[in-house]
Image (cartoon, grey):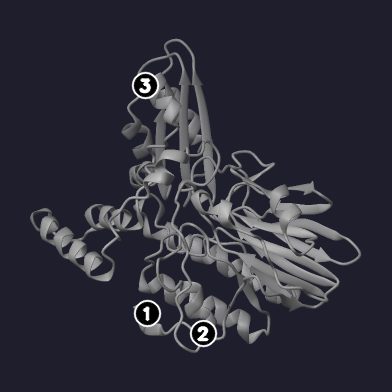
């Protein structure tokens, strides 16, 4: 028997709502998963991608994750993982760094056997590259096998990658596919195999109302999947449907019925009634101890804006989502991040971009060529209830030194 914790979409480093406490929350949730694994003496922690929220995590996030993985290593519990779309880099991956330190195993087409189960990995693959995949995995002699990968898979909602095709074409017969990318947990049987999402460990958007957690997967005579919740920061969702002549006082009354201390408060206003100034409701919640308060008055959103389904509670994420939907090249994304995330003064942004372009050109003369085929053929996925940057087509590239291990210098 093999019993593992299946987690993913931890998004360490995400400073949601630009609040430092939220950044800490994402690391704390990952730490909870690891400590649960240690307390339960799990055979392994299997991470299905998006360990980090961004491919350029801050040093504090890198070191915080390192400390968590050291806890797991000291308990002799292996950490098996693949690379997700958020964290994928053109050169060596952060997962390679942790592997070089003996703290992680980057799963691939060779089996990693834990107990009597062989685990394989497939990093996130952009849609434009999936037709070239042959799903050729090395043979194993274990009792069971599982594929760990990252993407939006059919038959789940918003799927653009067919899980049945992978199970049919793979050279190995898998008993389970352990998935990441969709932040909503779920499981279905496809061709006698369980296909399951573990969900995210923290709420990365206001649409993620259900409690966060992870899966416990047991491989024995059959595959059993159970769910365990995490103790994450409280989100208070207040939906107010205003009647005629009702206004801000009605909204405040509804918000005041909840314990707001240290909570993220999400208020949604609909119906008729008087105009409501969101700032007045947000101030009301903050005065009562809320960590964050965001108000959306859906009556003021035009039909066209509703079709785009963007949450303006976090403008930075809304912009990032739309930029990633454009099908730009990796270099173009780098330049976009330089402009929007630059800490330099506005007057110096031009010089900063010029320097970055020169660096890119010196590395690769083709780096600035947009992937026009991808942009023409790939439609942006519906983002109604999946994580915010699912359209990122960043291709993971394996970067290692001559010994097959990623050198620390490549990351810093």
The residue singled out by tag 1 in the image is: 410
Residue 267's label in the rendered image is none
Q: What is the total number of numbered labels drawn onto the structure image?
A: 3
State left or right for residue 49 relative to residue 110. left
Residue wearing tag 3: 300
Contact (Cβ within 8 Å) of mark 3 with mark 2? no
Q: Is residue 37 left or right of residue 102?
A: right
Give 373 or 215, whichever is nearer the viewer. Answer: 373
Q: Earlier in the sequence, mark 3 or mark 1?
A: 3
Task: Determine crowd level at label 3: few under 14, some 14-19, many 20+ residues with C-alpha closer than 10 A.
Answer: few
Q: Nearer the viewer, residue 404 or 193?
A: 404
Residue 334, image x and y in percent? 30, 58
Element under label 3? helix
Q: Please report whichever mark, 3 or 2, sits nearer to the chain's N-terminal start.
A: 3
Foreground residue among 201 and 142: 142
Kindly check if marks 1 and 2 are in contact, taking CB atoms under 8 A apart as contact. Answer: no
Report the residue marked by disc 2: 404
Say above or below: 51 vs 278. below
The kind of secondary structure element at disc 1 is helix
Label 1 to label 2: alpha-carbon separation = 13 Å
Tell me whether the residue at label 3 lies in contact with that at label 1, contact meaning CB atoms closer than 8 angstroms.
no
């Amino acid at each position: 028997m093999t019993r593992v914790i299946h987690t993913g979409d931890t998004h360490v480093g995400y400073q949601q709502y630009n609040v430092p406490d939220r950044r800490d929350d994402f690391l704390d949730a990952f730490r909870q998963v690891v400590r649960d694994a240690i307390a339960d003496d799990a055979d392994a922690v299997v991470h299905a991608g998006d360990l980090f929220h961004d491919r350029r995590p801050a040093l504090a996030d890198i070191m915080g994750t390192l400390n968590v993985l050291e806890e797991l290593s000291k308990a002799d519990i292996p950490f098996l993982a693949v690379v997700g779309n958020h964290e994928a880099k053109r050169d060596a991956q952060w997962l390679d760094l942790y592997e070089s330190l003996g703290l992680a195993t980057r799963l691939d087409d060779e089996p990693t056997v834990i107990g009597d189960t062989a685990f394989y990995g497939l990093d996130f693959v952009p849609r434009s590259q999936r037709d070239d995949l042959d799903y050729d995995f090395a043979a194993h002699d274990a009792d069971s096998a599982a594929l760990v990968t990252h993407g939006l898979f059919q038959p789940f909602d918003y799927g653009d990658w067919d899980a049945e095709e992978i199970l049919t074409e793979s050279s190995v017969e898998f008993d389970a596919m352990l998935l990441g990318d969709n932040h909503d947990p779920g499981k279905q049987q496809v061709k006698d195999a369980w296909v399951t999402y573990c969900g995210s460990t923290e709420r990365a958007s206001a649409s993620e109302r259900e409690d966060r957690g992870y899966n416990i997967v047991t491989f024995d005579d059959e595959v059993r999947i159970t769910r365990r919740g995490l103790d994450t920061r409280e989100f208070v969702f207040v939906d107010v449907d205003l009647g005629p002549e009702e206004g801000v006082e009605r909204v405040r009354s509804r918000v005041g019925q909840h314990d707001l201390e240290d909570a993220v408060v999400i208020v949604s206003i609909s119906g008729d009634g008087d105009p409501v100034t969101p700032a007045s409701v947000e101030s009301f919640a903050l005065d009562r101890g809320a960590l964050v308060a965001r108000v959306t008055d859906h009556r003021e959103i035009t039909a066209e804006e509703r079709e785009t389904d963007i949450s303006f509670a976090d403008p930075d994420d809304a912009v990032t989502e739309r930029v990633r939907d454009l099908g730009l090249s990796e270099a173009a994304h780098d330049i976009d991040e330089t402009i929007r995330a630059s800490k330099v003064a506005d007057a110096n942004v031009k010089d900063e971009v010029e320097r970055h372009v020169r660096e890119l050109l010196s590395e690769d003369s083709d780096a600035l060529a947009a992937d026009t085929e991808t942009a023409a053929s790939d439609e942006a996925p519906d983002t109604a209830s999946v994580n915010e940057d699912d359209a990122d087509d960043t291709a993971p590239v394996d970067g290692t030194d001559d010994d097959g291990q990623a050198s620390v210098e490549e990351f810093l």
